[in-house]
Image (spheres, grey):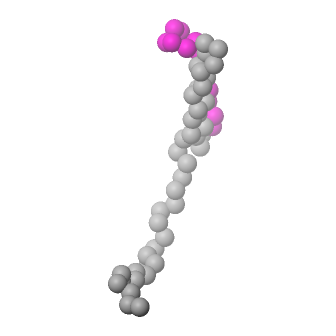
Amino acid sequence: MADHFPRTSAPASHPPERRLIAVGVIRRHGGRTTTVRATEAGVTGTTRPTGGAR
């Protein structure tokens, strides 16, 4: 059976290395909003009332 699609070789170089920039979580529970963010520099977090009241 004939191959109808041309075969391509693997790329000559590797793709650039991927790095984690940031990951975060926002949760709302019991009238409070908790925000946690992790980056290469460290982890930060806040807890505040839900609804924008500060």
- Say how many tags the image has: 0
- Residue 9 in percent (x, y) is at 43, 81
Q: Is residue 39 above or below residue 36?
A: below
- Residue 25 in percent (x, y) is at 58, 32
Front residue (pair 2, 30):
2
Can residue 29 be seen here? The reply is yes
Can residue 46 be seen here? The reply is no
Residue sitting at 52 percent across and 56 percent down? 18
Quarter holding the N terminus is bottom left
Q: Is residue 9 above or below residue 51?
A: below
Residue sitting at 60 percent across and 12 percent down? 31
- Residue 12 in percent (x, y) is at 44, 78
Residue sitting at 58 percent across and 12 percent down? 49
Front residue (pair 51, 17):
51
Q: Main secondary structure of the magenta part?
A: strand
Splitting the image into 4 quarters, where does residue 41 fall?
top right
Q: Which residues are magenta?
A: 42-54
Q: Is residue 13 left or right of residue 44?
A: left
Q: Residue furthest top?
A: 53
Q: Is residue 38 above or below residue 18?
A: above
Q: Residue furthest front?
A: 1
- Residue 36 in percent (x, y) is at 61, 30
Q: Is residue 48 magenta?
A: yes
Residue sitting at 35 percent across and 84 percent down? 4
Q: Is residue 31 magenta?
A: no
